[in-house]
Image (cartoon, rainbow, N blue to C red):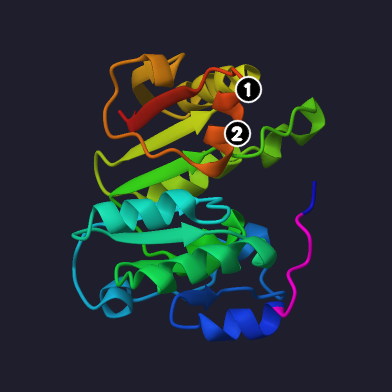
Amino acid sequence: MRPRHKKNLESRLEAVGDYLITLRNESLNFADAKNENHLLDLKELFGNSNPVHLEIGGGKGTFATTLAEREPDINVLCVEKVRDVIVVGCETAKEKGLKNIRFLDCAAEYLPSYIPEKSVELIYLNFSCPYPKKSYASHRLTSERFLNIYKPLLKDNAPIYQKTDNMHFFEFSIESFSKCGFELSNISLDLHNSDFEGNIVTEYEEKFSSQGFPIYRLEARLK
């Protein structure tokens, strides 16, 4: 379901301009993104050299803003391509007065053009769209196509954390990570009934968990 168009969207986006980085470039071909150089200076962006955590597909920013508030000594980059959604996260960050978070208005395919190599300490993939039809498998954010986008961005031994409510997508992800040279650990088939501590519940997670769906989680690191 597409989100409803937000009333006064442009003025709302303008009001949170300090938090929002608009990276849309209609002339940039996804396939050529890594050959384009529009790299962000992350140290200048945040005003420090703290570790950078990247959430891809951050939705309304519940997870990212909670993480930034909970961990003031890390910098959070939240990527979301739907402007009607990203504005909510920006407004939350502004309301909370968070200094260590920024939102990137772009699709994940563009990331090689904007995120420097070996600059990310951790990537979060929270409740990404599972694209259940096999013909759309390459659109899944844990497909081989996307994992090869993330690899150069990660620092050595930096992990990817994934959460989902979709068992078939989780199985696909396990296979995809393994094929792409990642080693899996801390796999949970029912996160909320495990001994895992420190979980930040997203808006989708709360919805699905309240309906009785188990939450699946894993951590993946390049071997």
Quarter of the image where one finds residue 187: top left
Residue 211 tag number: 1
Q: Main secondary structure of the magenta part?
A: loop
Q: Quadrant of the C terminus?
A: top left
Query: Is the residue 148 above or below the residue 190 in the image?
Result: below
Q: Is residue 142 visible?
A: no
**Residue 55 vs residue 97, the one in the foreground:** 97
Q: Is residue 120 visible?
A: yes
Q: How many marks?
A: 2
> Mark 2 packing: few (<14 Cα in 10 Å), some, or many (20+)?
few
Q: Are marks 2 and 1 in contact (CB under 8 Å)?
A: yes
- Image x and y of residue 106, in percent: 60, 65
**Residue 169 vs residue 41, the one in the foreground:** 169
Query: Does 193 lie within the magenta span?
Result: no
Q: Which residues are magenta?
A: 3-8
Q: CA distance from mark 2 to mark 1?
A: 7 Å
- Image x and y of residue 178, in percent: 45, 22
- Which kind of residue does numbered mark 1 sit on? Gln
Q: Secondary structure at mark 2?
A: helix
- Residue visible at 37% across and 29% down? 220
> Mark 1 packing: few (<14 Cα in 10 Å), some, or many (20+)?
few
- Residue visible at 66% across and 67% down? 83
- Which kind of residue does numbered mark 2 sit on? Lys
- Image x and y of residue 59, in percent: 58, 53
Residue 207 tag number: 2
- Image x and y of residue 14, in percent: 58, 86
- Residue visible at 24% across and 44% down? 156
Quarter of the image where one finds residue 208: top right
- Residue visible at 23% across and 54% down? 71
Quarter of the image where one finds residue 212: top right
Query: Is the residue 12 above or below the residue 136 in the image?
Result: below
Q: Is residue 152 left or right of residue 58?
A: left
